[in-house]
Image (spheres, helix red, strand yellow):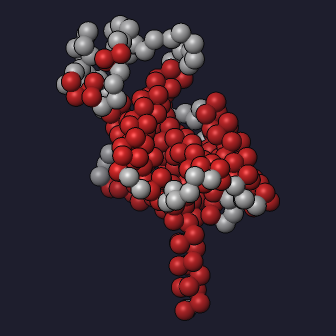
Amino acid sequence: MSYFVYVIIFIFGLAIGSFMNALIYRLYNQKPIVGNVRSECPHCGHVLAWRDLIPILSFIMLIGRCRYCKKKISWQYPLVEITTAVLFVFAFSYLGFSSYSTNQLLKVLNYWVILFALLFIFVYDLKYFLVEDVVVIPVAILSLIVNIIIGGTIWKLLLAGAAAALFFLFQYLITKGRGIGLGDTRIGLFMGFALSWPNIIVAIFFAYSIGLVVSLFLLLTRKRKVGAQMPFGPFLTMGTFIALFWADSIIKWYFNICKLS
């Protein structure tokens, strides 16, 4: 595959990452997403020109500060842009786009949509302690439809979505919302439709494992007190990311270990 293709995908990923930043800002501040809406500085409200909106380059040229009020631009913007671009290239390379069939194209697009949603959930929940259904629900339904079209087993997809959603809903009810948020049940639905059964189990296992390690680290370093609120969405997205690419290998490794024991 020509390196030129990867460069194009990287640039495309940067543009999508820039859109994600705008989406995060506008959703939280309840601003219109579509229509004749111009981007503006979150500090001074000045409408930004096209030269202020070039992914990565504008941040570098402005030395991380608004052209108009000189206040610092959040590092979220370049980090989200670069991360999106890298993930898009990685997914394209991982899937091995060897043929230009409709099925292969849908699979690549499906991975990109899933990765977009995972990164959006990670940043939004980490920053605002919220889950936006306007993103999670449509992506969950879209992922279910695309997975069915490209050959996924319907009952496995529905089972994974229902099992994950009910699993998190049960925890929410038991802890009365103190241990997990109700929004995580919708993330669970999305995870199930994106991963299918039994890959969803891998995602949940790693989500809780990573969450436990991070929580212990924060407690031991006294950066977070016992009982302090911590968003679970970022851990769910990390578990989903691992399962999306490596669940099959992990499951095979696990059963091989079981046979040897």
User: Where 103 sits versus 119, above or below?
Assistant: below
Q: Residue furthest bottom?
A: 260
Quadrant of the rendered structure where residue 163 is? bottom right
The percent position of residue 208, horizontal first and vertical second, equals: 52, 58
Point out the image quarter for the N terminus: bottom left
The percent position of residue 242, horizontal first and vertical second, equals: 50, 59
Point out the image quarter for the C terminus: bottom right
Quadrant of the rendered structure where residue 202 is? bottom right
Callout count: 0
The answer to whether residue 28 is visible is no
Q: Residue furthest right?
A: 155
The answer to whether residue 7 is visible is yes
Residue 160 appears left or right of 129: right
The percent position of residue 79, horizontal first and vertical second, equals: 34, 38
Residue in the picture at 57% in, 45% down: 109
Residue 158 appears left or right of 44: right
The percent position of residue 13, horizontal first and vertical second, equals: 43, 39
Q: Nearer the viewer, residue 166 or 91?
A: 91
Residue in the picture at 53% in, 72% down: 249
Residue in the picture at 68% in, 37% down: 137
Q: Nearer the viewer, residue 235 or 250?
A: 250
Residue 83 appears left or right of 176: left
Residue in the picture at 50% in, 20% down: 26
